[in-house]
Each structure stands twice: as structure tokens, then as C-alpha cells.
Image (tube, helix red, strand yellow):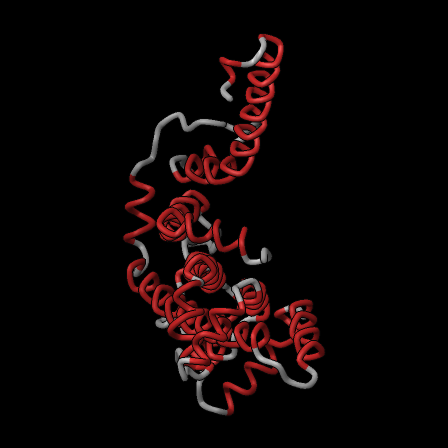
Amino acid sequence: MTAASLPPKSALRIRVNRLVLYTVLVVITGLFLGPFGWLVISGLKSPAELAASPVHWLPAHVQWHDFADAYRLIDFLGYARNSLVIALIYATLVTLSSAWVGFGFARLSAPGKKTLFGILLGSMMLPQMITLLPTYLIFARLGMVDTYWPWVLWGLASAPYLVFLFRQFFAGLPRELEEAAIVDGCGYAGIFWRIFLPQSWPVLAASFVIAFTWTWGDYIAPQLLLSTDRTTLAVALMTTYVNGAGVPVTNLKAAASVMYVVPILLIFLVAQRGFVAGMSTSGLK
């Protein structure tokens, strides 16, 4: 039944409800996009306009060259390449390892499985700062500082939140799929790779986007574990773009930050369908 076939009062109520809903959605979207819009505007201003009081909401003279200067003053592509390599390594490995662990918690039976799963979820409450110093000491003794090996090991260790996502998704798949594969002589490794993993593409997309964003935006671990030449773009943006007196040049930082955010936006736009589907179906049976 369409709005045109309803009584006039009901059709009017539906239109009003839609108008209110769309207005609320536009306002919420504006609140989320506001900081990014202000970042773009800040990247187009001069340092004097950024420091002016009262605030200049729009630049008097658009400084398009700020983006070119921010790109030229540092090895932008080199730092971005380092960030991309680390993020791809970690996101790929942690997605696969978390899927495997989530499959085990969802489909295998073992003594103490619920207790282990509770401990796994409880580990999500540990702040990164608590484990960072012991982790650094371990990697330093193993000679892995200033290499990409820490992110490889972190990826192989899986992530508790991603394990939870996969466990919830795999627990909702029909038991008949597993039983039919066992009858055909397929082991649990084959069931995971041939049946369950191909079915979980929404959660795979969501997991990859989340893990990639974590690593791309991480500042503390690269600052601690990598040298200046091998560091990531996030660290470079925070430690460069200063004038001769050591004062940060905020307009260049803003312009560089806009370019820094663009890859994340592109990845989300490409994988948004799978990301939304994975987040919405991971808890449904």
C-alpha cells in the first residue's frame, strides 16, 4: 500500500514523519561531517587567519598551495607507503586469524570454552598503554624494533573484538552446512576455508576496514617501535610542519591531515556495503 492510496490524514502523517526523519538524519550527518569540513577550511587559510580572534569561518583568500606545500615539505608518499604496508599487513593477518579463532569458539566444543571466551572479551578492557611497554621490551629483546615484524605478530595473535564479531556470525550459520561437509569427509579446516569463510564476506569486509583504520591512525606504536625513516604518516604529521621557532604551522598540518584521511574515506566508500552488512548481521541468528 502506497501513501497515495491511504486516507488523507494518514498520508499527511506519513509525509510529516518522513520529513522529520530526514531532517534529523541531515542534522546528524552535518554534525559528523562538521569536523572534517572545518579541517578542510582550516587547510585553506593562512596562519594569521587561523590565529585570528574572533574566528574567521571562511578564508578571505583561499590558500590552495597549502596542500602542495604540505605534500612537498616532507616525504609524504614515503610515509604514506609505510603506513599502507603496515596497515595492509596487520589488517589482512588479523582478519584471517580472528576469523579462525571465532570459528573455533562458535563451532567447536572443548572444556572451558565459555571461560576462555569470557577472558578474551575481558581483555578488551585493557588499555593499550598497559601492554605497550612490556610489548616493546619483548620486541627489543627479539631484535624486532624498527621492523614490520611487530605488526605481523600482532596480526597473527588476532583481536578480541574481531573474534567476537566472527564468533557471533559463525554461530548463526545453519548446523546442516557443517554436518553435510563432515558426512562428505571434510575436516574442520576444510569446513572453515571452503564453506564458512566464503559465507562471511560481510564480516570480513567489516573486520578489514576496522583493522586497517586502527593501524592507519595509530600513533603510539609506530612512534615507539619505528625509526624516523620507517615511521608512519600519522607520526610524521604530528612531529613535522613547524617553523624556525619550533611552532607548529597549523594550516599545513590541517592540509596534510585532509590528505591523510582521504585513503580511509576511499576504503570505506568501496567496502561500505559489506561493512554495514557485517556490523548488522554479526549478532543475528
Q: Is residue 86 left or right of residue 11?
A: left
Which percent across, then down, holds residue 157?
Answer: 52, 79
- Which percent across, then down, holds residue 190? 40, 80
* Residue 100 in the figure: left or right of residue 233: right
Along the line of sight, the residue nearer the viewer: 107 or 143: 107
Identified at 56% across, 69% down, the residue is: 163
Does the rendering let one see residue 24? yes
Residue 235 appears anywhere in the view: no
Count of numbered circles on the image = 0
Quarter of the image where one finds residue 234: bottom left
Residue at 44% over, 84% down: 187
Rendered image quadrant of residue 130: bottom right
Quarter of the rendering containing residue 13: top right
Q: Residue furthest top?
A: 8
Which sits in the foreground, 91 or 121?
A: 121
* In the image, residue 78 above or below residue 143: above
User: Residue at image x 28%, y 46%?
Assistant: 68
Q: Camera-side residue: 247 or 39?
A: 39
The residue at 33%/42% (across/down) is 66
From what the image shows, is residue 172 above or below residue 179? above
How far across and down, in percent of the image, does residue 188 sit? 47, 81
Image quadrant holding the C terminus, namely bottom right
Of residue 228 and residue 269, the one placed in the foreground of this image is 269
Task: Name the spot of residue 105 as percent of width and height, x first.
Answer: 59, 75
